[in-house]
Image (spheres, rainbow, N blue to C red):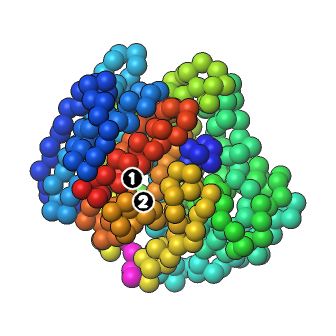
Amino acid sequence: MKRTATALVAAIAASVLTIPVASAAANSSPQSSHDSLRDRVNAVMETGETVGALARSTGPYGKQRSATAGVSDKATGEAVRPGDRFRIASASKTFVATVVLQLAGEGRLSLDDTVEDWLPGVVSGNGNDGSRITVRQLLQHTSGLFNYTADFPAFTSVDGFEAGRYTTWTDEQLVAIAMKHQPDFAPGTKWSYSNTGYILAGMIIKKATGHSWQQEVTHRIIKPLHLSHTSAPTTQTHIPGRHLRGYSNFEGSGATIDVTEFNPSAGSAAGGMISTSADLTRFYQALLGGHLLRPAEMKAMKTTVRAAEMDEVWAGARYGLGLMEVPLSCGGSYYGHGGDLPGYTTRDGATADGRRVVVLATTGDGAADLSTEHARNKLIDGELCS
């Protein structure tokens, strides 16, 4: 999911080193190439308004390090733990895109099929035309469809969230919100982030398989990879097991509230999943290691276009099919997908072969400027470049 343009955005045996992080105030030195994961997590906390943070960095030989800071629950003061679950928001898109690409590899659909081919009449009105939009364009954010979350009070204000946090939405209702608006541009002519495209992708998965996107993600990815702490809930409002509680004031629209309880149908295939840093690491290792997609489909996923809309946060960013490509300060680039929901932010990055993966989850709003965002990205870049 995306809040604003500036706030977007097989198991491997390994020894795990957990690093308890001191308070953010304990380290005020600038980041350098010698900074530890502890330092980088502290740097995120120092920017302010972050309640909790956890990071996991995995090297090419499976050696893993974890670092945490802050609290998982403001009411109890309980510290963040490396294995805490959290809402991954738009990082869900990579799972959904992987399923669509698997279906394409099986010949059950084509990336060049139109939305109208699969969902007749769903994308229509106000200049919207599903016969001109392809499945590929949905996954790459080049469809031109209005982003429904820009007209969705549950994501934009404290009052709106409180009124709608337990509401169950159908995918058809979410798409209908977008259909009230004219498209942003003609399909294929520009790039602009639109959660609407992934709601439609989830609907196409159901039409092609007879199963919901949640069932297909679970059957094709979660179970085979033994992602035991990852789930794709439908309407379950709580996060199971030990987890991070989220907090937000929705860009100052009211007092900061606990946003943990939330009906994920509002995000659906665009951002409804829950996971952990270890499970996300395993997912990216498997995906980029070539264990989930055939070469042709992996090539399609990594075929990117410029995403200039993201430059303020990720300079030079490009976007493929459910996968971002971001330049590294040390040369080359990394792949991943950020995720933002009120109170929760996920940032991740992996080398092209999946041998190095970094996952960061934070709660709270972060600083009002971009300092928290830049600190998160420096953590990903620093770990992958060190």
> How would you rate the neighbour count of disc 1 (Cα within 10 Å): few for under 14, some for 14-19, many for 20 or more?
many
Q: Which residues are magenta?
A: 291-295
Q: At which x and y percent is residue 255?
A: 60, 18
Name which quarter of the figure residue 210 lies in: bottom right
Q: At which x and y percent is residue 334?
A: 38, 64
Name the amino acid type tagged 2: Gly
Do tag 2 and tag 1 residues touch (Cβ < 8 Å)?
yes
Q: Is residue 293 left or right of residue 300?
A: left
Query: Mark 1 — residue?
Result: 348
The disc, 2 or 1, on the residue closer to the chain's N-terminal end is 2
Q: Residue at x 60, y 74 (%)?
A: 136
Give me the disc on residue 261: none
- Answer whether residue 269 is magenta in the image: no
Please state which of residues 141 and 177 is positioned toward the viewer in this rendering: 141
Q: Residue at x 66, y 60 (%)?
A: 192
Report the number of numbered marks.
2
Task: Give the position of the C terminus as an image quadrant.
Answer: bottom left
Query: Mark 2 — residue?
Result: 336
> How would you rate the neighbour count of disc 2 (Cα within 10 Å): few for under 14, some for 14-19, many for 20 or more?
many
Q: Is residue 19 left or right of residue 131?
A: left
Name the amino acid type tagged 1: Asp
Q: Is residue 375 visible?
A: yes
- Answer whether residue 294 is magenta in the image: yes
Q: Residue at x 67, y 30 (%)?
A: 157
Query: Magenta region, mostly helix, strand or loop?
Result: loop
Q: How far apart in space, not on screen, are marks 2 and 1 (Cα)? A: 6 Å
> Is 93 drawn above or below residue 363 in the view shown?
below
Q: Secondary structure at mark 1?
A: strand
Name which quarter of the figure residue 374 lies in: top left
